[in-house]
Image (cartoon, rainbow, N blue to C red):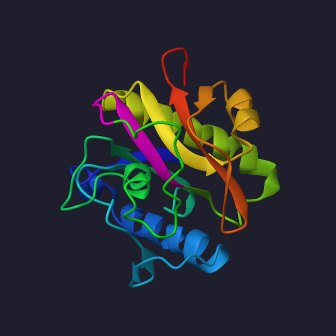
């Protein structure tokens, strides 16, 4: 099992890993979750998959994606879009309520957003915990490499247990909300004390 951080600057060094990641996202979000998201050539993508973002992929030696996550700077801007949580708060996204944060969405170089988090549905239970751990460790490493000290994410509301298991310091950044039948909540992860 390997963990690779992809960017527009290095994806050419990793063969089909980026397209495999987008295909795995399609399987997870469009096929499994039945979300209405953009897709092309068997890949899921959106307006936040830009050169500003980074993608962390947990994969096997053949490039089969086991898990993934996208990191986007809160300072990003592409046309009218910034980052998913902020754009939802600004009313630009129909699928996410605009009252998802307790206060105004941050815009700061040391805060990045984490989104499109998934573990492939066919990852065996026997290795699922290791895949989660590798994904969290890769996320923390990638975030530190770009100068992030905090990560803001919209994740399932069971995040406190997740944070405890992985040694992450986190706090609620918004109310618990039902989105597509799943209770979600915005959470701020603090990377200062985390040694991943």
Whether 146 is drawn above or below 98: the answer is above
**142 relative position to 135: left or right:** left
Residue 180 locus on image (x, y percent): 66, 69
**51 relative position to 20: left or right:** left
Residue 9 locus on image (x, y percent): 21, 50
**Boundaries of the magenta span:** 107-116
| Front-most of residues 112 and 70 | 112
Whether 77 is drawn above or below 79: the answer is above
Magenta includes 110? yes
Tell me which residue sits at (56%, 35%) in the image. 173
Q: How many labels, in total? A: 0
Whether 134 is drawn above or below 183: the answer is above
Question: Looking at the rendering, which quadrant does residue 51 occupy?
Answer: bottom left
Magenta includes 168? no
**Residue 1 visible, this orientation:** no
Whether 27 is drawn above or below 58: the answer is below
**58 relative position to 90: left or right:** right
Tell me which residue sits at (25%, 58%) in the image. 12
Magenta highlight: main SS: strand
| Front-most of residues 65 and 176 | 176
Residue furthest out toward the right = 126
**Residue 45 visible, this orientation:** yes
Tell me which residue sits at (41%, 24%) in the image. 149
Residue 22 locus on image (x, y percent): 44, 68
Tell me which residue sits at (42%, 66%) in the image. 93
Residue furthest out toward the top = 193
Residue 182 locus on image (x, y percent): 71, 61
Classify the position of the C terminus by image quarter.
Answer: top right
Residue furthest out toward the left = 79
């Amino acid at each position: 099992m390997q963990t690779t951080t992809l960017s527009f600057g290095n994806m050419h060094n990793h063969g089909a890993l980026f397209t495999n990641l987008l295909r795995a996202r399609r399987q997870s979000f469009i096929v499994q979750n039945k979300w209405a998201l953009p897709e092309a050539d068997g890949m899921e993508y959106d307006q936040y998959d830009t050169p500003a973002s980074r993608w962390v992929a947990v994969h096997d030696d053949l490039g089969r994606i086991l898990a993934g996550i996208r990191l986007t700077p809160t300072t990003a801007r592409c046309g009218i879009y910034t980052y998913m949580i902020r754009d939802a708060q600004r009313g630009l996204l129909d699928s996410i309520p605009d009252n998802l944060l307790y206060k105004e969405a941050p815009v700061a170089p040391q805060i990045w957003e984490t989104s499109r988090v998934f573990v492939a549905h066919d990852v065996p239970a026997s290795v699922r915990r290791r895949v989660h751990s590798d994904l969290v460790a890769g996320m923390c490493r990638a975030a530190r490499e770009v100068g992030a000290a905090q990560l803001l994410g919209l994740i399932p509301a069971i995040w406190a247990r997740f944070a405890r298991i992985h040694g992450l310091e986190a706090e609620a950044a918004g109310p618990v909300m039902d989105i597509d039948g799943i209770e979600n909540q915005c959470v701020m992860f603090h990377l200062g004390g985390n040694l991943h």
